[in-house]
Amino acid sequence: MDADISSQSIQGIATFEERARAIVSIEHVRTATATDIVAGVQPQLIVEPGTEQELAKILKLANEASLAVIPRGGGTKLSWGNPPRRADIVLSTARLGTVLEYAWSDLTVTLQAGCTVKQLREVLAQVGQRLALDSLWPSRATVGGILSTNDSGALRLRFGSLRDLVIGITIALPDGTLAKSGGKVVKNVAGYDLPKLVTGALGTLGVITQATFRLHPLPQESRTISCLAGNVREAQRLLLAIQNSKLAHSALQVRFVESMQPQIDVLFEATQAGLAAQVEQLKAILAPAAIIDPGPAVWNARQELYSAAMENEAPSALTKISVLPAQIAEAFETLIKITANRVRLNAVIQATGIGAVHLRAAPSVLGDTLSLLRIKFEAMGGSLVIAHHPQAAPQLDAWGNAGDALPLMRAVKQQFDPKSTLNPGRFVGGI
């Protein structure tokens, strides 16, 4: 335990631990270890409630004791965001993994926040349905975690982001009540669109305990077609040509790998006859570029960049960039110009203008590079969010400039979590 923790804080944690054990039983409260570190900050206790009601009681107990709470699902994205100002309690949803209601005929499913994406996929696939997103680390990532981080993927081009797919949600608030969107509620939260509000809020407003999603049928057939573009500007032209066509593609991305030519990947999902017609139209758009059929592995490119940054021992950083679709070429040219001869660079950018960029260099070089890149992207009207950087790199804000939205975001935080119990300091503007 850190030496600067006051005796009052130690007593507060000890009292909390005793009361928490009375709620969830002794075997579901344990001392945190080095494996539980959150963005470099060591928590004190791990608590695993078995029901939504238990979770709400634990959260209220921590709030009353002025203890900082870090919600955790599968733990795949705990390094995202800024380091917390404090991390007393990790509140785990590991025991909340049940599919509560599956209305397959209505294309909806309701499940607890600790259910993994893989588990959900397996349940839905039995009747030929899916939650149409391709999140990172699906075998470990939980529903609550992907909602808190708004982790969509290439499929958002056709099906929308998580904010478009989630249609109902229940969250535990720091005062111990459960707030539910729609229907009978335990606490009235009229005036807030809870599903959209908490999606991407990094667990700073409440702890997600369950969610309801709209579903889509699994495709009968799928096929990925790729081609090499001559240069970055040619890749931009082809992306826009595909987007402006009548093609019904499900995903579209461009990969920039070291010094190789940009590669464009297109995913089609349809019947066999429909696929054949779509591919022929695509060939006409891409001509005279050569067409290749690489298989579905290319859609793992985003996952590979994140994994390389977060699991490799070599100094590296992973950023999420966002620009207008028509600025993709300009964005990559900016990356090349700033990183040239100093930083090794790989990137995957979706046709929506959202991309993952993996940078490898000495920590001090990475710090300077990330700061300069953020200035350039914000000047373009875009953004650069740092998902991972070496601890040896200079301390960098993960989010960048929030602009005019920050006062409103702080007001919402004050309304939901006035004592800043949840993930203090981790979100935009130190929220």
Image (spheres, grey):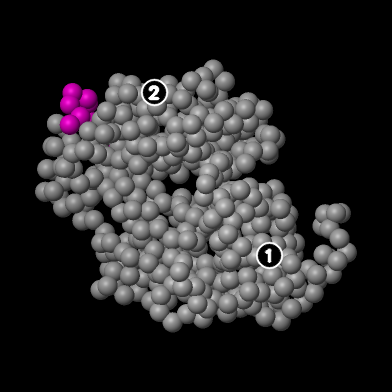
Highlighted magenta segment, given as a residue range: 285-295
Where is the C terminus found, in terms of image quarters?
A: bottom right
Q: Position of residue 209 (x, y in %)?
A: 52, 70
Magenta stretch: dominant secondary structure: loop
Q: Position of residue 328 (x, y in %)?
A: 37, 32
Where is the N terminus found, in terms of image quarters?
A: bottom right
Dot 2: few (<14), some (14–19), or many (≥20) neighbours within 10 Å? few
Q: Distance between the residues labelled 2 and 1?
A: 51 Å
Q: In this view, does 353 lie to the left or right of 414?
A: left
Q: Is residue 4 left or right of residue 186?
A: right
Q: Is residue 366 visible?
A: no
Position of residue 82 relative to residue 60, above or below, is above
Position of residue 278 relative to residue 88, above or below, is above
Residue 289 within the segment the image draws in magenta: yes
Q: SS of the residue at dot 1?
A: loop
Q: SS of the residue at dot 2?
A: loop
Residue located beneath label 2 in the image: 260
Q: What residue type is labelled 1?
A: Lys
Residue located beneath label 1 in the image: 419
Q: Earlier in the sequence, mark 2 or mark 1?
A: 2
Which residue is at 50% across, 77% downward? 188
Q: In this view, does 274 lie to the left or right of 142?
A: left
Dot 1: few (<14), some (14–19), or many (≥20) neighbours within 10 Å? some
